[in-house]
Image (tube, rainbow, N blue to C red):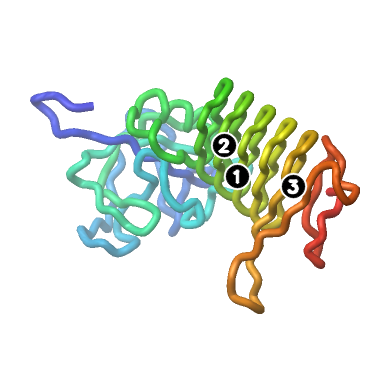
Amino acid sequence: MKNNDTPETVLVLRTCYADLTSHGGFQWPNEVGAIVTAPDWRNDNECGHGLHGWLFGQGDAGVSDSIRRQDAKWLVVEVALQDVVALGGKVKFPSCTIRHIGDKQSATEYLLEHEPRAASVAVIGSTLTGGNRSTLTGGYGSTLTGGYGSTLTGGDGSTLTGGDRSTLTGGYGSTLTGGDGSTLTGGNRSTLTGGEKSELRIRKWCSKSERYRTYNAYVGEDGIEPGVAYRLDDNNKFVKA
């Protein structure tokens, strides 16, 4: 998105409540092509005083108040690159042009189609499908599906499905399903389903030792069955979900 007459622009992903309001009650217009300007813009590296989002779709989903709402509106906006100010896990900018308004799937698909740089980052909420031996990486709430020998990495709340001998890694509360001979690693409160000869791993914070610990189970041993979903109980034992 660059030519000799206009400054380079980038696409930014963001979410709003169903009524298109955001933090502090700011009202976004329900119109593709509308130009939106922050009334309180301040050119500094502090949160607030501007419009906010995730550059190329990558960042910390936890900074959004609306992202976990089922009826959230997902927006893709175009911003002049020179106006983007990087913050922790997000960016801010004084103004933008709305390019897409929709749900999680439509917005992330639009972003990946129109922003080439999004292909190399973990786009929040993306739905990705790869063939055999694919490598897929998605951010918070992503859905990743890969064929034989794939490597899938998703953030918190992701859904990952891999074929035989796949390697799947999901964050907190993820759902992982792998074929025969797969290695599945999930964060706390994840649900793992592996095929024959798969290894199940759940990584959980231990407050007593102040470190993460990884708990393992092997399909075909100690009663762990193929094709059955397991989670970690309060005693750190694998039980059927």
Identity, as a three-letter code, of the amino acid under mark 2: Leu
The residue at 46%/32% (across/down) is 101
Residue corresponding to mark 3: 191
Evaluate whether residue 73 shows in this view.
no
The answer to whether residue 80 is above or below residue 46 is above
Q: Looking at the picture, how far across and down is residue 225, in whole percent?
A: 87, 41
Q: Residues within 10 Å of mark 1 (few under 14, many from 20)?
A: many
Furthest residue toward top: 131
Q: Are marks 1 and 2 in contact (CB under 8 Å)?
A: yes
Furthest residue toward bottom: 208
Task: Classify residue 114 by image quadrant.
Answer: top left
The residue at 73%/47% (across/down) is 200
Identity, as a three-letter code, of the amino acid under mark 1: Thr
Mark linked to residue 143: none
Q: What is the spatial separation of the Cα atoms under label 1 and label 3, in whole angstroms?
A: 12 Å
Q: Looking at the picture, how far across and down is residue 63, in whole percent?
A: 46, 57
Tally of marks:
3
Q: Residues within 10 Å of mark 2 (few under 14, many from 20)?
A: many
Residue corresponding to mark 2: 152
168 vs 122, left or right, is right
Label 1 vs 2, first from the N-terminus: 2
Identity, as a three-letter code, of the amino acid under mark 3: Thr
Furthest residue toward right: 223
Q: Quadrant of the N terminus?
A: top left
Q: Residue 47 versus residue 115: which sits nearer the camera? A: 115
Furthest residue toward left: 4
108 vs 189, left or right, is left
212 vs 34, left or right, is right
Q: Nearer the viewer, mark 1 or mark 3?
A: 1
Mark linked to residue 169: 1
Q: Looking at the picture, how far across and down is residue 162, in whole percent?
A: 65, 31
The answer to whether residue 220 is above or below residue 89 is above
